[in-house]
Image (spheres, coloured by chain):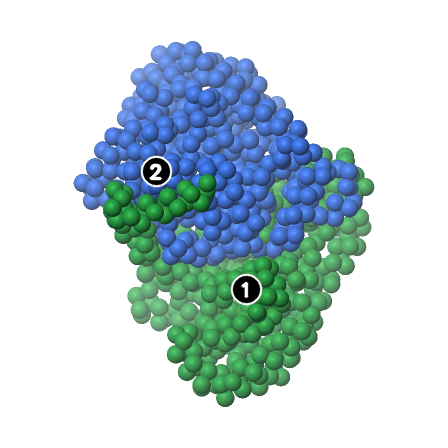
Chain colours: A green, B blue
């Protein structure tokens, strides 16, 4: 029956004699073509989930449906294109405490039905949250559950030794939602308002700027010095932008860096804060990797909130955090927050109005934020397991990052900064001239061409440097350090690289 | 210590002699004032969570902190401004099956730890979903988990007896996210591209149009005929818009209506489809209340997908559904979907690109969608309880809507269409001249003035008609039929109305 009606639909919409076929054609022209859409949408690019990720998904489906008969030279797809710690095949399990609290919030009767299944501190937490929130099936305050915002403020105060107010905290559906809100508000004049972004950058920034017709003002990070941020680079970019008639509205810092994993020195942070204050730029501090530190003694994290408060700087600051990264890795819940500092009540009221149109952030994301900022306390029943789980995650990631960087660096034509933070490596690759020519013949960026060949040969999906921005004639790719056995994984990367270079030598 | 640093910050930012104070002032002027923000943001209005809701929240906090000493003439706030079935103090509990599945997805070990706490069909569902998804802490496909999209397509096929493809389904963080995506894509020329919307409307539409600088093209619903939709009204609005140089891109239908609860006749739906096809308008069908039917025999729901397929119409259609309403009422999870029909692959690829920037919809929202479209099967262990729970919710809501409509209609100066669907009543109120004068003196819309007085006197928060749109000189308010005991609730409304009218007579 479905097929039948399906056929009818197809037939009618195709027949030029059908009375509606004409309007079909017209409506196609009028409303259904890409050209008729908001042109800003057409300019949006998001490499992390672009051509490569789509092809990887197709391979995954082929392998699932056909298995060995898929004819593919690999038996599984490894999605190293995205920092997704809990994805299938990887080995970062969720934190037990967080999931136990979440389960009790979904179905509180479990406290009576299976009391022995839950540690006491889990039950206490769930009771406290349930008393405040009621059902997690209800909308919360659009800015987020007040009690959870209070806990975020306490977490920030303890981290920075400076005051934080729940009124300045907005819980969000992941950090991306917050970044998108801020950029949509700050771009006051299409194609004229600009935002300074690091190169390489996380493509969310260029994608969101394109969507809201803002101008990306790139400043380059220094690969020769472990991807450090140079205030002179930023000043030069700012100067050039103003000469080009761009009105800079904000400056984005990603610390620890994505894709670079680099950490800013406090001195640089102070210079950045002064520069923003001087030029009236809103400082957007993307600090979602603040707890992914592999060599914390040498490369510690200091929040911009602390730096700005230490200085008594008046710079308007919005800092972002997330439950998707760190040791929680709860990407699927969509949880995060941003804190406003030196932002006027009127502007904050506008933010509130805008988030209220979206009603509220997902409640399980908000619960996740509460567990992020209020982990089990020492002495509590869950503490030992929580400590074990989080210590292991930090240790494995640090070891793996170091090992992968070493092995990539040992490859001819590959140089790789050993990331002190975040979840990624961003190796620079020197490609043979003939490979570059072949890429151009195929109409691809050379590093995209390389990454596609890598996917076809190994099932490993990475993101080409062209998606993050790089200097003319340089090529990189980003891969996550979240992977199954390093040997198998890096072994595949090495074998492919040697074969690729040999082929185009 | 916090206070201290707080003081330092305040002092420095105030002192005109401080080196940074100057740039503070500059930065305030440059970046921190409302005037420097995207002007489109300033035009956004969302009455459902506007002035009244904010004041209600303040009263709630006062009552929580001071209790009887709050000095307020009521002991609790009743949020009738928003369709939020599971909010505290209301009596629509979550569906047990849905929450049991959700709990097992959060912490699958419960299947072993507390096997007897869960019915077999819950365990089977959780196992199946877990096998497909893995950890719900991982990002899913940006369009939503493939298996869940397949189940949505099956649900649509069974509802409409027409084919539906998972490729045309996008899971979303509530219907609002989908509506916002579509409007952001369809507004190709600021202040020129328009969208036809019903008046009264759900303010999400005007808010989102304002955000993306689209033009709202209002067509009035007919209150005298139970808020019916007239094709002639729509044609007249379309004609006028074209005369005004507006380029109409889409037509919004809310069926069942919000705030009216009205259902479209199939004949009207066919006329609407033909009109959209003829003028190349995308038909945006907001069908989130499709299962909230109080008199289904007299006022049945037919989806636009079915109507369009029955006709073999080529009209580009996007229809929206949600887990926030209906009998699930899971607003806090942020789950929903939209289906594209007669939309080209290229345009769908653009939609995919845009949702991929937001990574993925919340996984618990997606699980909620699966439970919405795949409720327990007859014969399954959960079926009887599920049937009881859903039957009760339908029955209570239908009875309450009828009773509330009767009592409101019995009030002098109040007339109210007895909604056959959705969750609301939208009474029309005749206000005394002196009340209108007092409102104007206070700089308020008369019905907002009435609603504020209602909140101050009773703690009941409703939304004034001016937030939804109404004819010049007419006044309404929307209240939900989700409430504690009807007598107490409506009794307060009646008493207030009589006192208000007496005061301004």
Instruction: From the top left corner, tell me how far across and down residue A366 is, in percent.
Output: 60, 46
At label 1, counting other C-alpha atoms closer than 10 Å, the crowd grade (few under 14, some 14-19, many 20 or more) is many
> Image quarter for residue A433?
bottom left
Task: From this view, report whether residue A7 is shown above or below residue A502.
Answer: above
Pick the front one: A482 or B159: B159
Instruction: From the top left corner, tell me how far across and down residue B43 is, in percent.
Output: 35, 43
Pick the front one: B388 or A183: B388
Pick the front one: A111 or A291: A111
State whether residue B427 appears in this view: yes
Q: Which residue is mark 2?
A: B311
Residue at screen point 63% across, 35% down: B376
State whether residue B46 appears in this view: no
Residue at screen point 43% across, 78% down: A439
Task: From this view, report whether residue B188 is shown above or below residue A51.
Answer: above
Q: Are marks 1 and 2 on the same chain?
A: no
Please give the chain letter of the residue carrying mark 2. Answer: B
Q: Which residue is mark 1?
A: A59
Residue depth check, mark 1 versus mark 2: number of the one nearer the observer: 2
At label 2, counting other C-alpha atoms closer than 10 Å, the crowd grade (few under 14, some 14-19, many 20 or more) is some
């Amino acid at each position: 029956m479905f097929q039948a009606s399906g056929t009818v639909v197809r037939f009618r919409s195709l027949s030029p004699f059908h009375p509606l076929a004409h309007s079909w054609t017209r409506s196609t022209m009028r409303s259904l073509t890409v050209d008729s859409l908001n042109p800003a949408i057409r300019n949006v690019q998001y490499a992390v989930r672009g051509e490569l990720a789509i092809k990887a998904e197709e391979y995954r489906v082929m392998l699932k449906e056909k298995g060995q008969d898929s004819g593919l030279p690999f038996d599984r797809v490894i999605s190293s294109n995205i920092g997704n710690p809990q994805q299938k095949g990887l080995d970062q399990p969720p934190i037990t405490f967080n999931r136990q609290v979440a389960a009790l919030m979904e179905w509180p009767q479990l406290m009576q039905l299976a009391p022995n299944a839950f540690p006491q501190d889990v039950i206490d937490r769930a009771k406290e949250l349930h008393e405040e929130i009621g059902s997690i099936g209800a909308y919360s305050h659009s800015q987020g559950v007040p009690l959870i915002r209070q806990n975020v403020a306490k977490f920030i105060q303890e981290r920075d030794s400076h005051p934080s107010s729940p009124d300045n905290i907005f819980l969000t559906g992941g950090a991306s939602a917050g970044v998108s809100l801020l950029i949509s508000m700050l771009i006051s004049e299409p194609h004229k308002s600009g935002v300074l972004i690091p190169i390489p950058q996380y493509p969310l920034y260029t994608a969101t700027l394109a969507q809201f017709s803002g101008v990306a003002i790139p400043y380059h990070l220094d690969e020769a010095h472990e991807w450090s941020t140079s205030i002179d680079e930023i000043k030069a970019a700012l100067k050039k932008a103003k000469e080009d008639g761009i009105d800079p509205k904000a400056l984005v810092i990603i610390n620890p860096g994505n894709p670079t994993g680099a950490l800013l020195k406090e001195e640089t942070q102070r210079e950045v804060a002064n520069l923003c204050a001087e030029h009236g730029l809103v400082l957007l501090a993307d600090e979602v990797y603040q707890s992914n530190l592999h060599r914390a003694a040498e490369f510690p994290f200091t929040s911009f909130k602390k730096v700005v408060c230490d200085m008594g700087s008046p710079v308007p600051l919005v800092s972002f955090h997330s439950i998707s990264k760190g040791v929680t890795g709860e990407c699927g819940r969509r949880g995060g927050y941003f804190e406003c500092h030196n932002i006027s009540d009127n502007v904050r009221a506008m933010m509130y109005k805008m988030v209220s149109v979206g009603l509220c952030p997902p409640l399980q994301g908000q619960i996740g934020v509460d567990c992020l900022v209020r982990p089990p306390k020492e002495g509590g029943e869950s503490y030992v397991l929580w400590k074990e789980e989080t210590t292991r995650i930090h240790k494995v990631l640090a070891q793996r990052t170091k090992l992968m960087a070493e092995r990539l660096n040992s490859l001819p034509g590959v140089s790789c900064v050993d990331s002190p933070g975040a979840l990624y490596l961003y190796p620079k690759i020197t490609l043979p001239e003939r490979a570059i020519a072949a890429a151009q013949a195929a109409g691809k960026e050379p590093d995209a061409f390389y990454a596609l060949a890598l996917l076809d040969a190994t099932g490993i999906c990475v993101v080409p440097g062209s998606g993050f921005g790089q200097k003319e004639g340089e090529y990189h790719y980003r891969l996550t350090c979240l992977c199954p056995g390093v040997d198998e994984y890096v072994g595949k990367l090495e074998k492919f690289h040697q074969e690729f270079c040999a082929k185009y030598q």
